[in-house]
């Protein structure tokens, strides 16, 4: 049981996030960019405050130059983050940047004073900020990437400084550098990575559960309405057609009356499994009502009609046994189809066209698929 739970956690963290999570993560990236710009602005005060009354103007100028560079880059990242979801690589680039800038600042401190580079708590804490901010992007892969990068870069920095600096490594302002203290810092980075990963996993599970139908396990209406605009955008960009099939189980109230609620729930799951079998890559099935489903197919409407009609015919060949040893129950469905962009360019327009054709299929005697207005 514990092994299965661990595998599920790892699969969630390493897998591609749900589309809703990516949508929220895009907004999180913009928020992170704004926070980075604010923190970078505040970072300007650090070298200025350190330089007041200091004799070493070189260190102050180096710190000031680094702070100016960080502020300029923060504005670049902010401008890129405003272009919603266009740059899929941006979270990884900015996460790597946050970690590398922190390592660079520590390395600059270590050149002047090795103890300052390894014992500076203020600069080192920016590793923790970089890891924690990945939680706002809702992508477990990003958290693991940034956390691992921070651990590796800091371990390399520690090993390099200890190898090159004269021993013992110490200063009046920053104290002595010890392997125990540096090991504790690496452990803290690992703990922060695990903690943030747990938060991201929890968020992913909550979003997944809110976007899934509890009875069948397929996406629900909220997930579908969030997903469709992104699919339409990709189809428009690639010059492809997306077909929508609105499916309704025929005479389902009568089925419920005959086999009861538990049997009716099993019938809904049976139809969902049957429809799910016809899905190809980047195609989806969602349950939007009691006995209503939506198929999103990556093919022209003619091909979609052939596929759905074939599954309509074969559904009767796959009756499922009723409870208490009763006769197997055969089911049928009616469906209405609509195609993007021919029948509409929005989710509401396409679902409206599909529903109009579904109603026509019902008026025509049910157990049929209609793809055109009559």
Image (cartoon, helix red, strand yellow):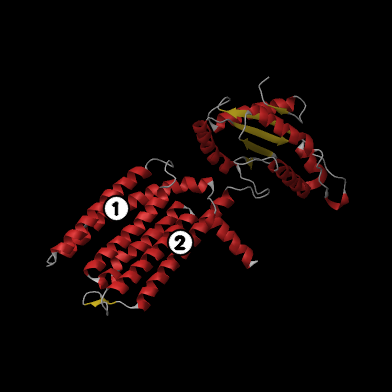
Classify 229 as above or below 178.
above
Graded by Cα atoms within 10 Å as few (under 14), some (14 to 19) or many (20 or more), the crowding at tag 2 reads: many
Q: Which mark is residue 26?
A: none
Graded by Cα atoms within 10 Å as few (under 14), some (14 to 19) or many (20 or more), the crowding at tag 1 reads: few
Query: Which numbered disc flags the more N-terminal residue, 2 or 1?
Result: 1
At x 37%, y 71%, the residue is 185
Q: Which mark is residue 196?
A: 2
- Mark 1, residue position: 38
Q: CA distance from mark 2 to mark 1?
A: 22 Å
Percent across and percent down for residue 165 are 27, 74
Image quadrant for the N terminus? bottom right
- The one of 120 and 32 positioned closer to us in this rendering: 120
- The one of 259 and 248 positioned closer to us in this rendering: 248
- The one of 302 and 365 positioned closer to us in this rendering: 302
Classify 135 as above or below 361.
below
Q: What is the quadrant of residue 355 in the picture? A: top right
Image quadrant for the C terminus? top right
In this image, 104 relative to 136: left or right?
A: left
State whether residue 355 appears in this view. Answer: no
Name the element at disc 2.
Answer: helix
């Amino acid at each position: 049981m514990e092994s299965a739970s661990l595998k599920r956690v790892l699969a969630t963290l390493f897998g591609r996030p749900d589309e809703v999570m990516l949508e929220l993560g895009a907004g999180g990236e913009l928020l992170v960019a704004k926070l980075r710009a604010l923190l970078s602005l505040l970072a300007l005060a650090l070298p200025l405050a350190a330089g007041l009354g200091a004799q070493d103007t070189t260190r102050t100028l180096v710190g000031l130059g680094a702070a100016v560079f960080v502020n300029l880059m923060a504005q670049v990242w902010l401008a890129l983050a405003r272009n919603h979801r266009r740059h899929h690589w941006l979270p990884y680039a900015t996460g790597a940047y946050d970690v590398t800038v922190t390592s660079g600042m520590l390395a600059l401190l270590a050149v002047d004073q090795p103890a300052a580079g390894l014992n500076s708590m203020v600069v080192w804490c920016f590793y923790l900020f970089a890891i924690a901010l990945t939680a706002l992007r809702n992508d477990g892969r990003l958290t693991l990437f940034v956390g691992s990068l921070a651990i590796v870069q800091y371990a390399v920095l520690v090993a390099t400084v200890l190898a090159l600096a004269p021993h013992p490594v110490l200063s009046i302002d920053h104290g002595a550098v010890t392997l125990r203290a540096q090991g504790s810092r690496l452990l803290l980075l690992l703990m922060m990575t695990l903690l943030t990963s747990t938060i991201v996993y929890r968020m992913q599970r909550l979003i997944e559960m809110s976007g899934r139908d509890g009875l069948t396990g397929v996406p629900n209406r909220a997930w579908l309405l969030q997903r469709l605009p992104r699919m339409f955008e990709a189809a428009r960009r690639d010059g492809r057609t997306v077909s929508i099939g609105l499916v309704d189980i025929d005479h389902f109230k009568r089925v419920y009356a005959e086999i009861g609620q538990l049997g009716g729930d099993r019938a809904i799951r049976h139809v969902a499994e049957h429809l799910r079998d016809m899905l190809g890559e980047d195609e989806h099935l969602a349950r939007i009502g009691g006995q209503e489903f939506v198929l999103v197919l990556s093919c022209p409407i003619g091909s979609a009609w052939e596929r759905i009609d074939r599954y309509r015919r074969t559904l009767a060949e796959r009756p499922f046994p009723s409870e208490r040893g009763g006769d197997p129950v055969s089911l049928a469905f009616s469906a209405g189809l609509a195609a993007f962009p021919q029948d509409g360019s929005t989710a509401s327009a396409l679902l409206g066209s599909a529903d109009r054709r579904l109603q026509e299929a019902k008026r025509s005697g049910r157990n049929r698929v209609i793809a055109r207005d009559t």
